[in-house]
Image: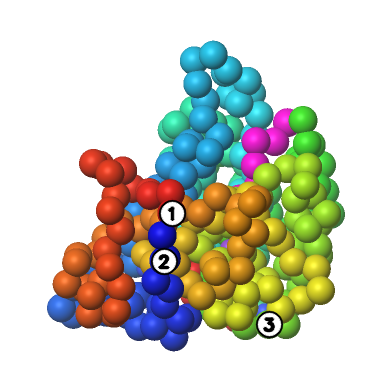
Amino acid sequence: MSIKVVSSKLAAEIDKELMGPHIGFTLQQLMELAGFSVAQAITREFPINKADQSLRKKNVFVIAGPGNNGGDGLVAARHLKLFGYNPIVYYPKRSEKQPFYKQLVNQLDFFKVPLLSQEDNDNWMDYLKEEDTVCIVDAIFGFSFKPPMRPPFQDIVDKLVELEDKIPIVSVDIPTGWDVDQGPITERFISPSLLVSLTVPKPCSTFINKKKTSHYIGGRFISREFANKFGFEPFNYESTDQVLKI
Ligand SMILES: NC(=O)C1=CN([C@@H]2O[C@H](COP(=O)(O)OP(=O)(O)OC[C@H]3O[C@@H](n4cnc5c(N)ncnc54)[C@H](OP(=O)(O)O)[C@@H]3O)[C@@H](O)[C@H]2O)[C@H](O)CC1
Ligand SMILES: [K+]
């Protein structure tokens, strides 16, 4: 199925219009739905089923960046906890940009989701044992990443590249470090096992390794008219699903 993609410029315009005066979504609403869809895609690819409860004993290691991509990760972690998984969140650089990020962190405390922070910079890897980890969620950067990567994120991404064949990586919206339109622009880059594009896939998603990466669309919050206005068809989500495998 040939999937329409929209450029990073158009993705930002879509976001602006969704949160503009006519439609009036709040960022919190979109982030809640986006984060929920990431969590649901993970349950589809890494199901806890009756026969195999072992995933309940393993961790989902969520790395949250300083922006809204990171916010999606914080929301996804909360939903994963409620779905019976054991998320651990590593949130190295807290951004004060959005006051409600603090509330997302409070909610993680409330749901007893361990949160590693700046002080853990040196030993966050101790929590990433291959045999104890279901997957790593890359919620570091989304469509506002502008290279070159500033510390401490380059070291983190280098470690993820090393680990990706041992522990599956789930990238939220954009594999971190990729150019939103051009795809991978560095020698070494993350090649995720699962990409969850939000609202509509970005051009970089055409560069995923189709043999390795499962691709889902999430962020089910647009109408047919809205999609057509931006030049794409809405996605045929099934029933009440918040994700669709594409
Ligand atoms: N409708 C939707 O699709 C929604 C998508 N959501 C998610 O939002 C992200 C985009 O979020 P945004 O906050 O615009 O940007 P990012 O999270 O990608 O990154 C911005 C922060 O990252 C810092 N940054 C940028 N480049 C670098 C770099 N090279 N090195 C270090 N840090 C970097 C940037 O810092 P600045 O100082 O430059 O501002 C920001 O702090 C989208 O991808 C979706 O995942 C929403 O959740 C809901 C709606
Ligand atoms: K990401």
| In magenta stretch: residue 184 | no
Q: Which mark is residue 147?
A: 3
The extreme front residue here reads 1
Most foreground residue, 86 or 170: 170
Q: Main secondary structure of the magenta part?
A: strand
- Give the foreground label among 2 and 3: 2
Residue 240 percent across, percent down from the top left: 25, 42
Residue 63 seen anywhere in this rendered image of the structure: no
Give the amino acid type for the residue marked by disc 3 in the picture.
Pro
Q: Residue at x 48, y 36 (%)?
A: 43
User: Would you say 232 lies left or right of 115 here?
Assistant: left
Q: Earlier in the sequence, mark 3 or mark 1?
A: 3
Residue 24 percent across, percent down from the top left: 20, 72
Give the amino acid type for the residue marked by disc 1 in the picture.
Ile
- Give the labeled residue for mark 2: 3
Give the amino acid type for the residue marked by disc 2 in the picture.
Ile
Q: In the rendered image, which quarter is residue 82 located in?
A: top left
Q: Decide: is 149 above or below 128.
A: below
The extreme bottom residue here reads 9
Q: Earlier in the sequence, mark 2 or mark 3?
A: 2
